Image: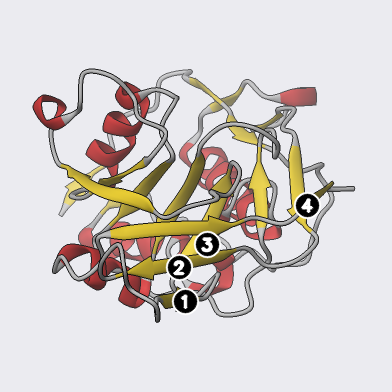
Amino acid sequence: MATALPMLPLCAAVLLALPPGNDEIEVPAPDSTPAITAAEIRRHVGILAGDAMQGRDTGSPGGFAAARYIAAVFERAGLEPAGDDGTFLQGVGVVGFDLVEPPRILAYSGADDEAPFEAEVGREFRYLSGTGSDAPLTVLHVTSSEELPAEPRADVALVFAGAFGSQYGLMQEAGSGWGALVLSGPPMPGQPGAPARGVGTPDGGELRIMARGSLVQRLADGSVTHLRAEVPASAPVP
């Protein structure tokens, strides 16, 4: 068992995109034991990754609950707050929107497939932002920078596989101008009935989604060659 080092007057703050005072989710108290143990680390991970945090989406009750939990851990560790009004929390402005109807993702096994698989929002994919497509987009799998085409194509859906950290890096490197950008894998449980909520600007830009559930497997085994999205109108989050 390792013991904690003497605490220096470090400053810390947790960024959140939800006004303080949202108590829809009860936040458990962190362990006050001053030792660093495997059990303590597992408890932190279990709480933050648990179902009670509801995915910790930006601007959601789960996201704010996770921020409050981390702030409590910082406080018990003896860190000096550097957030708003002497707290460990620092608010940031984020534009969000809700779709008035659920978006649809159709996964085709070929260009002439007349019975595509319809992915369910929440269960098989999470909508992030962007607009739909009038015609099916050709799926192109990308696992490294070397596999990125030299020029963006509006008729292509780039599918990024591997660890989420590398996927986000490749998505940023790909830039804009594509038909769709898809984060896919590793497989993770879906959230049936989850709201179709996006962050950023709803109109314009390529479609961005995170594949979940069976859609991840369909993309990984090559049974999906084309994707088409239908994205309805949106309304600002109040």
- Mark seen at residue 55: 3
Query: Which residue is tagged 1?
Result: 118
Within 10 Å of disc 4 (Cα), the crowding (few <14, some 14-19, many 20+) is few
Of residues 43 and 192, the one drawn nearer to the viewer in this rendering: 192
Q: Which residue is identified by label 4?
A: 233
Q: CA distance from mark 4 to mark 2?
A: 18 Å
Q: Amino acid at mark 4?
A: Ala
In this picture, residue 142 sits left or right of residue 4? left
Which mark is first along the chain, 2 or 3? 3
Horizontal and vertical percent for residue 73?
Answer: 51, 46
Residue at horizontal 21 percent and vertical 60 percent from the top: 38
Evaluate whether residue 29 shows in this view: yes
Above or below 53: residue 155? above
Residue 37, percent across and down? Answer: 24, 56
Q: Would residue 98 be found to the left or right of residue 112 on screen?
A: right
- Residues under numbered marks 2 and 1 in contact, where contact means CB atoms less than 8 Å apart: yes
Write the residue at 53% across / 46% down: 70
Residue 31 visible within the image: no
Q: Determine the image quadrant of residue 143.
A: top left
Mark toward the start of the polypeptide (1 vs 4):
1
- Give the Cα distance between marks 3 and 1: 23 Å
What's the CA distance linking mark 4 and mark 3?
24 Å
Helix, strand or loop status at disc 1? strand
> According to the image, label 2 marks what residue?
106
Left or right: where does residue 55 sit relative to residue 87? Answer: left
Amino acid found under the numbered disc labelled 2: Leu
Which sits in the foreground, 112 or 141? 112
Q: Residue at x 78, y 52 (%)?
A: 233
Q: Are marks 4 and 3 in contact (CB under 8 Å)?
A: no
For the residues marked 2 and 1, what is the alpha-carbon distance in whole angstroms?
5 Å
Q: Earlier in the sequence, mark 4 or mark 2?
A: 2
